DNA sequence: AGATTTATGTTCGTTATCCAACTTAATGGA
DNA sequence: TCCATTAAGTTGGATAACGAACATAAATCT
């Protein structure tokens, strides 16, 4: 259980040329991400960008009355804190740890220094940002046109893709906040999926039993996002399985 | 009616230092944007970035069944074609001219050359991109939580901000496509606004009669987007009124 | 002027989601 | 071991938006 961690577990970092990655590695700091940790609050100042490895971060927009909706998820395929290199420094969204795990962080200062040395990383992060925009946009359309059940399927599959496990640690209440619907709506949709044997639910632990069936029920939005990530970040392949020592 | 056009009518271009703008101006080409023109189709190849001056472009996501939803609008505050400098080259969205008018275009080649000469423009475009992400994200939340009437108010105000006029040329049918709702829903909401004297509607021409009242009825989403644009692009002030000769 | 097209207005039954109140059951500390 | 807490399931009524069909009226064309 010692050197279970490696920067290459994050697929963006893994996509860097060896030379660049070696240099950056020395500036990376491993951090644990407990469930529910708020990495930043709307308008807050972020001091680091985070490269999740085994954790998943949820980007939420919160309304004045407290209602919220998830606009994107960030897992081992991505990075949290794009405003630091896009130039805005902050954003009006909230970032919450959706799934416990680890990640690496890099200080804003070191990030900017790295951009000056070589633009490899910068270009990669921009492409990632574009993929993230697709995720957000597709979420907007999905919110408008698809049922709670379809959106739940989408959410489960997107989360699953960012984990190595079939088990998600997540209450229905929290999923409801993510999807921006009522908890009862999630209960109903999840109940149906459970009755049909696609998932099994037990007090905050969802086990996906039949992923292919989920892919049949999900709306097209899932595939659009996945395809766009694959297109924009083709070099970012699944090497993380044997990345740890 | 001769030199009615000037690059400074686009607020991004206007925000460039004089030196940079002078150099870029020679590479710009004025283009007319007729209503309904599709500037790019999902996955299509864009050869230019467009800087609208008097036109408004709508970014739409279209589902397989033809249903759609607008994820952002681009007017004289912005630029169309961010995928060209973000590195993705294309995006899965559609861009349609929502309001007739003019704009300047710059070839992808010249854009990239400019980035090599000086990064002023690049940095500005990245900040703009971040503002656009906010617009898209807020649209996602708005789609989930707010009524058709609130969304119509938001849409009217965002469009109004990108025009110099109080008259929008737009049928209810098209607005319905933008908002991703039925035409009848727009008729109902617009009818209410008209009865209350906020707008007046006449076969594709909406005149805004009482903008302050619209700002009272609109959901918070409008202000969030506006504030974020102002924060990210503060130098981009309204100088275009006397920008033309 | 008359005919066609296009834009808007209206109705009615249907449905998905919401809202609120409550039940059941598992979990984890005292 | 018991109790407070938290997660999940259930119900019934309200509502916003949908889907479809149709009515009206302005604009356009011949």
Image (cartoon, coloured by chain):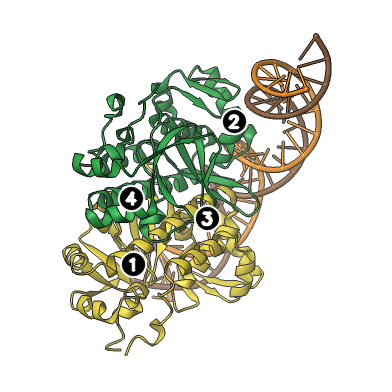
Chain colours: A yellow, B green, C brown, D orange
For the residues beneath circles 2 and 3, the answer to whether they share a chain is: yes
Q: Which mark is residue B130?
A: 4
The residue that mark 1 highlights is A124
Q: Nearer the viewer, mark 2 or mark 1?
A: 1
Please name whichever residue, B242 or C8, is drawn nearer the observer in this view of the structure: B242
| Residue A67 visible in the displayed image | no
Determine whether B223 is above or below A71 in the image. Answer: above
Left or right of residue D22: residue B182 = left
The residue that mark 2 highlights is B172
Q: What residue is rendered at 51% in x and 52% in y?
A: B93
For the residues beneath circles 4 and 1, the answer to whether they share a chain is: no
Give the CA separation, mark 1 to mark 3: 22 Å
Give the CA separation, mark 2 to mark 1: 41 Å
Mark 3 residue element = loop
Give the CA separation, mark 4 to mark 1: 16 Å
* Mark 2 or 4, nearer chain start: 4
For the residues beneath circles 4 and 3, the answer to whether they share a chain is: yes
Give the CA separation, mark 4 to mark 3: 23 Å
Please name whichever residue, C13 or B233, is drawn nearer the observer in this view of the structure: B233
Q: Where residue B96 sits in the image (x, y, percent)?
A: 52, 42
Q: Where residue A182 sits in the image (x, y, percent)?
A: 51, 51
The residue that mark 3 highlights is B44
* Mark 4 or 3, nearer chain start: 3
| Residue A122 visible in the displayed image | yes
Mark 4 residue element = helix
Give the CA separation, mark 2 to mark 4: 30 Å
Give the CA separation, mark 2 to mark 3: 28 Å
Q: Residues within 10 Å of mark 1 (few under 14, many from 20)?
A: many
Determine whether D16 is above or below B122 in the image. Answer: above
Please name whichever residue, D21 or A151, is drawn nearer the observer in this view of the structure: D21
On the image, which quarter does residue B218 sit in? top left
């Amino acid at each position: 259980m010692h050197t279970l961690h490696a920067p290459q577990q994050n697929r963006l970092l893994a996509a860097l040329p060896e030379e660049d990655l070696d240099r950056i590695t020395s500036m990376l700091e491993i951090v644990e991400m407990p469930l529910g940790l708020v990495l930043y609050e709307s308008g807050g100042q972020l001091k680091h960008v985070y490269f999740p490895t085994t954790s998943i971060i949820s980007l939420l927009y919160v309304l004045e009355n407290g209602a919220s909706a998830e606009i994107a998820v960030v897992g081992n395929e991505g990075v949290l804190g794009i405003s630091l290199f896009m130039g805005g420094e902050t954003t009006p969204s909230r970032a919450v740890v959706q799934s416990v795990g680890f990640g690496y962080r890099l200080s804003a200062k070191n990030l900017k220094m790295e951009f000056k040395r070589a633009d490899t990383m910068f270009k990669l992060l921009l492409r990632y940002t574009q993929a993230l925009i697709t995720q957000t946009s597709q979420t907007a359309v999905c919110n408008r046109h698809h049922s709670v059940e379809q959106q739940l399927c989408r959410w489960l599959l997107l989360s699953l893709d960012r984990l190595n496990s079939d088990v998600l640690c997540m209450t229905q209440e929290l999923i409801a906040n993510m999807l921006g619907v009522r908890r009862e709506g999630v209960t109903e949709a999840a109940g149906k999926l459970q009755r049909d044997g696609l998932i099994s639910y037990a007090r905050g632990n969802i086990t996906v039993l039949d992923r292919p069936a989920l892919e049949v029920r999900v709306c097209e939005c899932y595939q659009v996002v996945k395809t766009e990530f694959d297109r924009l970040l083709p070099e970012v392949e699944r090497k993380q399985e044997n990345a740890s020592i």
